[in-house]
């Protein structure tokens, strides 16, 4: 029998290799031969998965966005009874990529953002990732303002005025803090303090007092 190849798994493995190399050298310094060596597969295997370097990079940036979004969803699902305010606090930590173990992922994301400024296919992929994260933020802010828990069903009622704006602001702040930590302008602990101070102010601007706001664990 011919050997069965897990192409989906191989593509994810290659994407991980791309992310590591982009974090080290930037997108321009990544070649398909280098990716094959890092992923420990043949060059032919990479070429069978991706027709071009551009297609490979596009899949890799989608992979990073999906990984961050999935971590957020897993964290929400793990504690469905937590308040929406606490869930939003944890989500903000995940999006900002402040923990040391996510530093390579943050460098990769920033490199892709820079390239997306002059490349529409990557920009379109990043917009999709941002839209998915913003949708989750909107849901949690609306639930927290309503006094609900993170396990409440989404879409139960109209989104209060200002929630979309607050979601955009939080996402932009998390993005900016990622850059400042990577550049060494702020420490991870300082960035986390700014993030949670912003969340505390958010509830005042919306005129609500959520049941619980947890600062979460300190980033290293």
Image (spheres, rainbow, N blue to C red):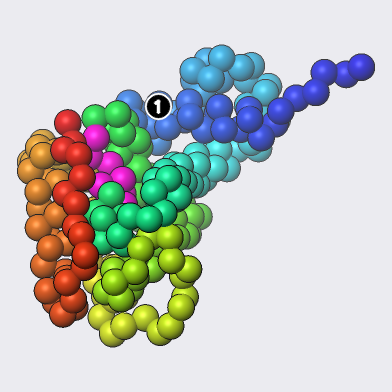
Instruction: Specify the quadrant that holds the N terminus.
Output: top right
Badge 1 local density, few (<14 within 10 Å), some, or many (20+)?
A: many
- From the top left corner, tell me how far across and down residue 130 is, in percent: 39, 59
Q: Could you tell whether 215 is left or right of 175 in the image?
A: left
Q: In this picture, which residue range is highlighted in magenta?
A: 91-99
Q: Is residue 8 left or right of residue 89?
A: right
> Is 142 a magenta residue?
no
How many discs mark residues in the rendered view? 1
Q: Reply above or below: 103 against 191.
A: above
141, above or below 180, in the image: below
Please say whether residue 29 is visible from this viewpoint: no
Q: Is residue 149 visible?
A: yes
x and y percentages locating residue 32 in the rendered image: 54, 26
In the figure, residue 147 lies in which quadrant? bottom left
Between 136 and 39, the residue placed more toward the observer is 136
Q: Is residue 26 above or below residue 191?
A: above
Residue at the spot 30% in from the left edge and 60% down from the top edge:
83
Report the residue at 56% width, 14% height from top.
40
Which secondary structure, mark 1? helix
Query: Residue shown at 66%/35% (left/top)?
Result: 8
Q: Main structural element of the magenta stretch: helix, strand or loop?
A: helix
Would you identify the image quadrant in which residue 99 lies? Answer: top left
- Identify which residue, 153 or 200, lies in the foreground: 153
Q: Position of residue 220 (x, y in %)?
A: 17, 31
Residue under numbered circle 1: 20
Residue at point 20%, 45% (across, down): 216
Where is residue 55 drawn, in percent x and y?
A: 57, 42
Q: Would you say residue 96 sits in the magenta stretch?
A: yes
Q: Along the line of sight, which residue is nearer the eye, 161 or 79?
A: 79
Residue 184: image quadrant is top left
Relative to 172, say whether 21 is above or below: above
């Amino acid at each position: 029998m011919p050997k069965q190849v897990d192409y989906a798994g191989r593509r994810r493995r290659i994407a991980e290799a791309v992310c590591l190399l982009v974090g080290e050298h930037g997108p321009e310094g990544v070649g398909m031969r280098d990716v094959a060596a890092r992923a420990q597969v043949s060059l032919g295997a990479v070429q069978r998965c991706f027709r071009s370097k551009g297609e490979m990079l596009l899949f890799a940036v989608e992979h990073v966005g999906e990984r961050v979004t999935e971590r957020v969803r897993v964290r929400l699902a793990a504690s469905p009874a937590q308040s929406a305010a606490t869930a939003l606090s944890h989500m903000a930590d995940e999006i900002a990529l402040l923990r040391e173990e996510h530093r390579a992922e943050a460098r990769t994301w920033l490199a892709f953002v820079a390239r997306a400024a002059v490349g529409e296919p990557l920009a379109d992929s990043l917009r999709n990732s941002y839209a998915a994260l913003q949708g989750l933020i909107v849901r949690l802010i609306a639930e927290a303002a309503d006094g609900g828990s993170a396990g409440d069903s989404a879409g139960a009622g109209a989104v209060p005025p200002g929630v979309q704006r607050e979601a955009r602001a939080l996402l932009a702040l998390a993005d900016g803090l990622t850059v400042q930590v990577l550049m060494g302008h702020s420490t991870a602990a300082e960035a986390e303090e700014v993030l949670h101070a912003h969340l505390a102010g958010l509830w005042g601007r919306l005129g609500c007092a959520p049941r619980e706001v947890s600062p979460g664990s300190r980033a290293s």
